[in-house]
Image (cartoon, rainbow, N blue to C red):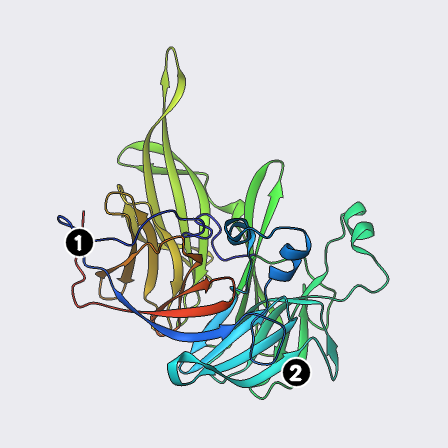
Amino acid sequence: MRKFVRWGILLAGAMVFLLTGCGRRPAVMGKEVFLVAQIGNGQGQVGSNHDLLTNEGIVDDVEIKDYLDVPTGIQILGKKVYIADKYRRMILVYAPGQFGRPIPQMEIANVGEGYAFDTVFQVVVNKYGDIYALVSLPETNTTWKEAESTNDMHQYAIYKFGYNGRFLFAIGIGGINTSPMPAPDFIDLDLFGNLYVYFREERNGELFWKVRRYSSSGELNFEFDSQYLAKKHEIDGETYQSELYGIANLKNDERLLFFTGNYLFKSHPERGNQLVGYRNILEMYSILKNAVSRQLLDEKSRLEDVLGVTWDDTIVLYGYDEKYRVVRFHFYDMFKDQHTYQYAPILSDYYANFGFYVAPDGELYSILVKNNKQYILLHWKKRSRTRLFE
């Protein structure tokens, strides 16, 4: 249930050395340890499936790294780290202390006054410190097997907690206090207090995105379905077939962002239809006008995906640069029409790597696990050189 699954976990299983200085290549960011916590089930620790793997007989270090899972649903606001710990089944709030050692600020258990959940998958936090948690619900009268057999997988909800951890209300598919929802891919917020919930649905072999938006008090106030988007784009006089694979929302405006892959096919007398062209297109969709209002980017040569949108509505894209073996981050300020770039090295397989996260302030972090024992958040320090390296 990870945001923008097209790239998935960029660095998982990477068998590459740290880049060494040889020849012309982009200057990479430095890094510092922001938070380091022990993996386990105790106070101040972060959960994982390590014990489950060991109990299944997976003891080889390399095999454990291949299957190791830790919480990746995080949010970082200032000096607080919010973690959706699906293995300890609670929401953890830490402040990094000296040398990144975690100082527990708050733990929200899976059972409390007025609420209960089974597993928590993602947390997002608004500017007031209120916490929204995407959770699965406890099994009540229906077992998972019965739910699967009847295709009734509406077993999820979003819980809202105050800044002090007090439970406020639950949001179901139709809004506050309604029936549970199917599993969302991810959730997000804007600065007006709206909550965006993103779903993907497969219909007749085709994948569609659905968006539901809820007010700060939990009422459903907007719905969107990508089935109504055009399946083709006219680009430079050619007809491209389009697929929506990335979606996000702005924070200061009532707009969605669509990231589409566009494919140009030509018929060959012997080999049939051949892919001869590809374009990434980023578009802005106005919720108020119910229409695509502006094309932002048309990338002919770079393969990128949306990592996130910051509170000042800078769009952060990222992709793997095969030529230089680095991860490239593209910061696009649409209002200034300004592009800046940062690069990060690929870490060696000494660590288990779980990909990157962009905080609301635009700072970059990544999650890794060292020796199957330490959960580490790295803060990547941006460089002043921001030109695009081709």
In this rendered view, identify the residue nearer to me: 81 or 203.
Answer: 81
Residue at the extreme top: 270
In the rendered image of this protein, does residue 216 appear above or below residue 238?
A: below
Residue at the extreme right: 141
SS at badge 2:
strand
Q: Viewer-nearest of labels 1 and 2? A: 1
Quadrant where the image shows the N terminus: bottom right
In this rendered view, identify the residue nearer to me: 292 or 340.
Answer: 340
Residue at the extreme bottom: 164
Place of residue 116 in the rendered image (x, y in percent of width and height, measured from the top left): 74, 74
In this rendered view, identify the residue nearer to me: 362 or 259.
Answer: 362
Q: Which of marks 1 and 2 is nearer the N terminus?
A: 1
> Does residue 35 appear in the picture of this structure?
yes
* Residue 265 appears left or right of 247: left
In the rendered image of this protein, does residue 125 appear above or below residue 72?
A: below
Badge 2 density bin: few <14, some 14–19, many ≥20, Cα 10 Å? some
Going by the numbered disc 1, the residue's amino acid type is Gly
In this rendered view, identify the residue nearer to me: 76 or 353.
Answer: 353
> In which image quadrant can residue 204 be found?
top right
Q: Which residue is drawn at 51% across and 64% down?
A: 72
Disc sitting over residue 168 in the figure: 2
Going by the numbered disc 2, the residue's amino acid type is Leu
Place of residue 335 in the rendered image (x, y in percent of width and height, measured from the top left): 26, 66
In the rendered image of this protein, does residue 53 appear above or below residue 222?
A: above
> In which image quadrant can residue 306 be found?
bottom left
> In which image quadrant can residue 135 be found?
bottom right
The residue identified by callout 1 is 21
SS at badge 1:
loop
Disc sitting over residue 76 in the figure: none
> Does residue 49 appear in the picture of this structure?
no
